[in-house]
Image: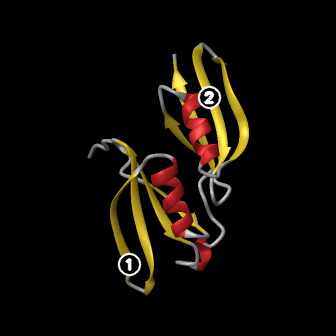
Amino acid sequence: MMFSGFHHIGLLTSDVQRSLTFYTEGLGGKEVFSFPLPSDIDKTIYLVELAEGAVVELIPRGVEEVESNARWAHICLETDDVRGAYEAALAAGAKPRSEPEDGFLGTMERTGAFVFGPDDEVIEFFHVK
């Protein structure tokens, strides 16, 4: 058995429509699939492709009580324009966490920045030089 990478990363959202707008219109992602939850026809899950192989699954909170307060630690999106991604996210309603900066992580030279998304999820923009 071999893994070829991640298919998607799931994010529990408090307002799935707000998150869908943020990830599509704000960050330029493309909705590639959606389906209603079998247990609740009024709740829909959306898959948004931000780049090839970078898919975020937007899940309405309350699907399972044990997950109602869960979310990822952070998601890191690779880009060749960290500053542009950071500004686009802020314009789409994200809150700043750390402004773009150049530096080193050990011997790796990089540019990075962080924002808080619609549900206070942490999104990192990252470029290895």
Is residue 52 placed above or below 118 in the rendered structure?
above
Q: Secondary structure at mark 2?
A: strand
User: Where residue 7 appears, x then y in whole percent?
Assistant: 36, 51
Residue at the image point whose x is 35% and y is 68% from the top: 34
Q: Under tag 1, what secondary structure?
A: strand
* Outermost residue to the top: 107
Q: Is 84 located above or below residue 104 in the figure?
A: below
**Residue at position x 35%, y 73% from top?**
35
Foreground: 66 or 77?
Answer: 77
Q: Give the total number of marks visible in the rendering.
A: 2
User: Percent from the top left, x then y, of residue 33?
Assistant: 32, 63
**In the rendering, which numbered label is found on residue 36?**
1
On residue 112, the disc is 2
Corner quadrant of residue 124 = top right
Q: At 49% from the left edge and 61% from the top edge, which residue is drawn?
A: 20
Amino acid type of the residue that numbered disc 1 sits on in the rendered structure: Pro
User: x, y percentage for residue 109?
Assistant: 58, 15
- Is residue 43 positioned above or below 16 on the image? below
How packed mark 2 is, by other alpha carbons closer than 10 Å (few <14, some 14-19, many 20 or more), is many
Q: Residues within 10 Å of mark 1 (few under 14, many from 20)?
A: few
Looking at marks 2 and 1 on the same chain, the residue that comes earlier in the sequence is marked by 1
Q: How is the image coloured?
A: secondary structure
Q: Which residue occupies the extreme front position in the image?
A: 91
Front residue of 27 and 39: 27
Is 28 left or right of 53, judged from the image as shown?
right
Q: CA distance from mark 2 to mark 1?
A: 36 Å
In the rendered image, the residue lying farthest to the left is 1
Residue 41, by quadrant, is bottom left
The residue lying at 62 percent from left, 73 percent from top is 68
The amino acid type, in three-letter code, at marker 2 is Gly
